Image (cartoon, coloured by chain):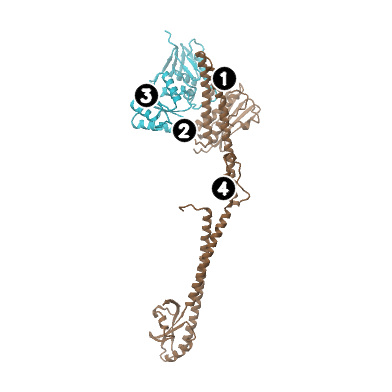
């Protein structure tokens, strides 16, 4: 997976590149709009991360150029402009997502994965497995090591999200949005409480812990290092 | 008007135009009356003379005799011209030139005064038949005319005098008009000077109200009201800026201290990870705070609702209860929902507004108590009431509860998941965006927030 970052703020660009490289992507970083457009036209990228305010050409112009030249790779906007009109404009011009600065890296990573997975097409699974944890989506049943786990409807959705996106760190805001459709930050620790309760049901009685808190990032459900 | 003239010029112009119209009208009326008067006088004179001549004709038995008598009658009337014809044959002319003064006979209507000009003079004349007292009773056409020159001259002089008078009066009216307008607009100039002296830091300057005419007093008091509003807004913005600076100072100081302590000596990777994670949490809180402050700033600039739809309030409350379910169980608080109503507004924003109130209630609710959310329509308003049992909010805090960064409990340290005291301010601005109101009462360990929205759809 090859990504192109067009971002004129040096520090932001460098850290994004570092973070995404460590997340396993090939990353090119460009600081100027014109050069960025050239890169985007000459090479094939799976995703372009685009700042709106850029020297040379701005983000709107770049995406317009790309789309008029039938380059349909996904584009994710990063912008300091938090105006509904801007967001709508970005999406109208054919962007796939729009993140407002300051954003958390975990959030960006989660969204990049959503966009890249979109193209791959999800095969309709009805059973999810992680280690000995099993989720039956049809019967709405969860079990671990053959023992049934009783979950509320929302806990089930939460576990499904964690399992479908295992090994990915999911920020709290994304969890709130995906599970409860709450698209704003609550000023409470409600997500932490909900996760704690889910953990109590999923991990507490077992030696191997599957759900982990990554401080300052979010939560991840990880397969333990394979023990053959 | 292509060029924009000053109010003074416009008023003076109107004044002058009005004066000219009035004076010219008066002048025309006077001229017309004088002329009519002269015409009537001439007609009367002519009839008089005509009758006299008719008498002479009617009592003369032959033309020569008639002519002799006519000369006697006519010659002491200056400016009187007489012409007699019989069968279109001239039989008498009062002077040699008299016959040349008359137009053709057929232009006359019997007994109607005719006005005509000839050789630069204006005449009034009249024709009528008379019967000679001869045996044949022969018909004589009698024409009488007078030279109206001195009347014309008089009318002309009057006209000229009027014109000169009108000209002078108009100029005078112009001068007076400019003076009056200038004086009348003096309060405006005073206001202008006042306005020029107003600076953002000194918005308390006032426009004069008592010393100006009524119409301008209205303007002045409106301007004063505007200044008062601006002043309060300006003060709010200033406060907001200083609030922001203060609120940012603490977390930034923490971050800086923590980071600098961390790099002051080598540590284990684990310790670094701890510090960075703690920093990340602090940064996330900062980011949230900045987003919230931007939201408030935009709301105060009259942010329009991004989208308006019809919302079942109960559905939103249910969704929020599901969201806060885990938290409520942990705090051993029971969530109770009663009633439903329809609202039109922005779903995300309303949800956020309700969420802030609910999370606030959860924060302060006693264990094993109920949080009741009642939704009902009363009159033209939809009410959403959230009640929780918990410590009574002090009287002093109530009015400040919706202020930015206000925390009722000043001693309370900023818990990691806690907001920065913007939640209720955001709720209030969202409610106001929907043309609603929010109020809070707290007594006997019961705190109740009431959100009231108008039933009729909000215009985005």
x and y percent of residue B238 in the render? 57, 34
The residue at which mark 3 appears reads as A46
Q: Which of marks 1 and 4 is nearer the N terminus?
A: 4
Of all chains, the one bearing label 2 is A
* Local secondary structure at mark 3: loop
Letter of the brown chain: B
From the viewer's perspective, is the residue at label 4 or at label 2 nearer? Answer: 4
- Report which colour depicts chain A: cyan
Where B193 falls versus B100 (above or below)?
Answer: above
From the viewer's perspective, is the residue at label 3 or at label 4 nearer? Answer: 4
In this rendering, would A34 be left or right of B25?
left
Of all chains, the one bearing label 4 is B
From the viewer's perspective, is the residue at label 1 or at label 4 nearer? Answer: 4
Q: Tags 4 and 2 in contact by the CB under 8 Å rule?
A: no
* Disc 2 to disc 3, C-alpha distance: 27 Å
| Count of numbered marks | 4
Where A64 falls versus B39 (above or below)?
Answer: above
Q: Which residue is drawn at 51% across and 38% down?
A: B458
Circle 1 crowding by C-alpha within 10 Å: few under 14, some 14–19, many from 20: some
The quarter holding residue A77 reads top left
The answer to whether one can see residue B384 in this image is: no
* Disc 4 to disc 2, C-alpha distance: 40 Å
The residue at which mark 1 appears reads as B330
From the viewer's perspective, is the residue at label 1 or at label 2 nearer? Answer: 2
* Local secondary structure at mark 4: helix
Taking depth in this image into account, of B379 and B86 the one nearest to the observer is B86
């Amino acid at each position: 997976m090859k990504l192109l970052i067009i971002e004129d703020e040096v520090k932001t660009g460098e850290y994004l590149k570092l973070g995404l490289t460590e997340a396993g992507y090939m990353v090119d970083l460009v600081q100027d709009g014109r050069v960025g457009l050239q890169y985007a036209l000459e090479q094939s990228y799976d995703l372009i991360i685009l700042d709106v305010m850029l020297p040379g050409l701005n983000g709107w112009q770049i995406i317009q150029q790309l789309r008029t030249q039938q380059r349909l790779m996904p584009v994710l906007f990063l912008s300091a402009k938090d105006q509904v009109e801007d967001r709508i404009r970005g999406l109208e011009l054919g962007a796939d997502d729009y993140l407002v600065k300051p954003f958390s890296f975990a959030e960006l990573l989660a969204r990049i994965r959503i966009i890249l997975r979109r193209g791959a097409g999800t095969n309709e699974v009805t059973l999810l497995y992680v280690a000995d944890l099993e989720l039956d989506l049809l019967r709405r049943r969860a079990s671990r090591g053959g023992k049934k786990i009783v979950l509320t409807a929302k806990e089930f959705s939460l576990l499904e999200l964690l399992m479908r996106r295992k090994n990915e760190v999911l920020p709290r805001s994304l969890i709130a949005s995906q599970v409860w459709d709450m698209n704003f930050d609550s000023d409470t620790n409600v997500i932490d409480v909900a996760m704690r309760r889910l953990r109590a049901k999923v991990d507490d009685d077992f030696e191997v812990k599957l759900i982990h808190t990554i401080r300052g990032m979010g939560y991840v459900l990880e397969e333990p290092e394979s023990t053959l | 008007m292509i060029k924009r003239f000053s109010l003074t010029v416009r008023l003076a112009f109107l004044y002058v135009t009005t004066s000219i119209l009035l004076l010219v009208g008066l002048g025309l009326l006077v001229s017309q009356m004088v002329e009519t008067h002269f015409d009537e006088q001439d007609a009367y004179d002519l009839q008089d003379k005509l009758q006299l001549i008719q008498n002479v004709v009617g009592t003369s038995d032959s033309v020569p005799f008639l002519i002799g008598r006519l000369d006697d009658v006519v010659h002491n009337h200056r400016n009187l011209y007489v012409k007699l014809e019989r069968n279109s044959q001239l039989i008498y002319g009062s002077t040699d030139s008299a016959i040349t003064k008359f137009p053709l006979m057929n232009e006359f209507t019997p007994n109607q005064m005719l006005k005509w000009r000839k050789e630069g003079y204006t005449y009034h004349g009249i024709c009528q038949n008379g019967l000679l007292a001869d045996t044949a009773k022969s018909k004589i056409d009698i024409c009488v005319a007078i030279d109206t020159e001195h009347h014309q001259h008089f009318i002309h002089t009057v006209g000229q005098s009027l014109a000169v008078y009108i000209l002078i009066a108009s100029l005078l009216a112009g001068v007076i008009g400019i003076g009056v307008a200038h004086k009348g607009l003096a309060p405006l100039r005073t206001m202008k000077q006042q306005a020029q002296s107003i600076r953002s830091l000194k918005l308390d300057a006032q426009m004069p109200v008592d010393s100006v005419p009524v119409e301008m007093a209205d303007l002045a008091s409106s301007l004063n009201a505007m200044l008062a509003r601006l002043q309060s807004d300006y003060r709010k913005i200033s406060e907001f800026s200083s609030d922001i600076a203060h609120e940012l100072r603490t977390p930034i100081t923490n971050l800086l201290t923590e980071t600098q302590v961390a790099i002051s000596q080598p540590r284990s990777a684990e310790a670094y990870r701890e510090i960075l994670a703690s920093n990340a949490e602090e940064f996330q809180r900062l980011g949230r705070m900045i987003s919230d402050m931007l939201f408030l700033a935009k709301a105060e600039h009259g942010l329009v609702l991004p989208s308006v739809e019809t919302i079942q309030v109960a559905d939103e409350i249910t969704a929020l209860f599901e969201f806060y379910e885990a938290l409520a169980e942990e705090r051993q608080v029971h969530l109770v929902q009663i009633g439903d109503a329809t609202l039109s507004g922005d779903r995300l924003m309303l949800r956020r507004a309700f969420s802030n109130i609910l999370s606030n209630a959860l924060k302060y609710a006693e264990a094993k108590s109920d949080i009741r959310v009642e939704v009902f329509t009363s009159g033209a308003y939809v009410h959403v009431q959230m009640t929780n049992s918990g410590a009574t909010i002090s009287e002093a805090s109530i009015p400040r509860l919706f202020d930015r960064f206000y925390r009722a409990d000043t001693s309370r340290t900023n818990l990691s998941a806690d907001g920065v005291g913007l939640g209720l301010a955001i709720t209030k601005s969202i409610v106001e965006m929907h043309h609603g109101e929010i109020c809070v009462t707290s007594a006997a360990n019961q705190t109740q927030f009431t959100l009231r929205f108008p039933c009729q759809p909000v215009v985005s």
